[in-house]
Amino acid sequence: MLTIKQITENTEAVLSGLEKKHFKNAKETIEKVIEVNETRRNTQTGLDNSLAEVNALSKTIGQLMKEGKKEEAESARARVGELKEKNKALEATLSEAVNELQELLYTIPNIPHESVPEGTSAEDNVVERTGGHDADLPADALPHWELAKKYDLIDFELGVKITGAGFPVYKGKGARLQRALINFFLDEARDAGYLEIEPPYVVNEASGYGTGQLPDKEGQMYHATADNLYLIPTAEVPVTNIYRDVILEEKDLPIKNCAYSACFRREAGSYGKDVRGLNRLHQFNKVEIVRIDRPEHSYESLNEMIAHVENLVSKLGLPYRILRLCGGDMSFTSAITFDFEVYSAAQKRWLEVSSVSNFESYQANRLKCRYRNAEKKTELCHTLNGSALALPRIVAALLENYQTPEGIRIPEVLVPYCGFDIID
């Protein structure tokens, strides 16, 4: 979340950023934050002064009694009693202001980086660059859901029987392809210096608030209400929360972690042809990369993460493009995001397979994730993450783009992981 210092010292810049992100009622919300913060500050000052007076009076009562000044001592006791009652009211007011301020701050999105383009939707995103080679497919090329059925790789109907729509069952070479991609992505991350983490797939409420998934305004998280735990929508949540309430040493930054996990998203409101097959699921596999860094180095880290993801899609031989998201298409918590899309030759459309984001200090402020600098002062870290990569649409593109009359070829880099070079 934004810091009070950001809001009070750079109010106009904050409002301008919120306008770029199309945050409704920005001016009213920021004014309310400033008002409630002023109440909090004044109440805290009043309480501190009152507590100091209580302490001072308490120290004098004994001395007055020793000196035989009983009347003055009783007057001091009475004053202490009055102040304690006053302090109860001040503490209640302070607690209310602190809670209200926290709830207000949770409703305010991150401020976009100055390089984020203006825009309201995906149509306004900017193509940074493209790469890869177009697939040369016959006119009767099949979409991945038909290929999955033809070669008995993925059973969507069986998933519906067991759980419901959006929970496919992978079989045979389809399951082996999943495992091959996971291991390939993890090995590539490890070779790039990322420490592998195997995180829990459920998190507590504090973790959800830490990375900004809570409060869940869109109802996209699966909630196990009996235990008040949440199924993770991405490994970003448990991995970044490793550093909640932690003070790191500057020499240890940047921290680089990677993790494979299953991901769970309700995808409420998703429907239509664009969600068919693997295009949009409730459960899917993904390898995530996460960095914790110093503010002055975080954009260098972002560029390195983009290069890492670009290397993955290049090695898979898929046509791709990188988009710089506009203000209106970015996530609530992000300061800047680059999306990777691969081209589905059979569907003739682009499929998002990764988002790489810098959250600057927004998540770190929620997490209280700090580092100790050379002057031994603590500062908020910057947090970053990216999909490297999400499997479903990668699998869809591989099946479609590598189909031949003889079967589906396997990219050369995956053959050692799969143990086969063609699905036939």
Image: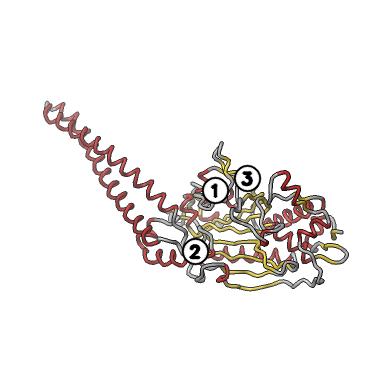
Amino acid tagged 1 = Asn
- In this view, the mark in front (1 or 2): 1
Please tell me the numbered disc located at residue 241.
1
**Is the Cβ of the residue at disc 1 closer than 8 Å to that at disc 3?**
no
- In this view, the mark in front (1 or 3): 3
Which residue occupies the foreground of this view, 114 or 68?
114
Amino acid tagged 2 = Glu
Q: Label 3 vs label 2: CA separation?
A: 32 Å
Q: Which residue is mark 3?
A: 201
Please tell me the numbered disc located at residue 159.
none
Please tell me the numbered disc located at residue 296.
2
Which part of the image, by quadrant, shows the C terminus?
Answer: bottom right
Q: Residues within 10 Å of mark 3 (few under 14, many from 20)?
A: some
**Is the Cβ of the residue at disc 3 closer than 8 Å to that at disc 2?**
no
Amino acid tagged 3 = Tyr
Residue 93: x %, y % from top left:
30, 43
How did the renderer colour the structure? secondary structure
Q: Label 1 vs label 2: CA separation?
A: 22 Å
Q: Residue at x 40, y 66 (%)?
A: 13
Q: Quadrant of residue 353?
A: bottom right
Instruction: Look at the picture and state if 252 lies above or below 80.
Output: below
Q: Label 1 vs label 3: CA separation?
A: 13 Å
Residue 370: x %, y % from top left:
48, 52
Which type of secondary structure does the marked residue at label 2 adopt?
A: helix
Which type of secondary structure does the marked residue at label 3 adopt?
A: loop
Residue 179: x %, y % from top left:
75, 52
Label located before the other in sequence (1 or 2): 1
Answer whether residue 389 is visible to the viewer in this image.
Answer: no
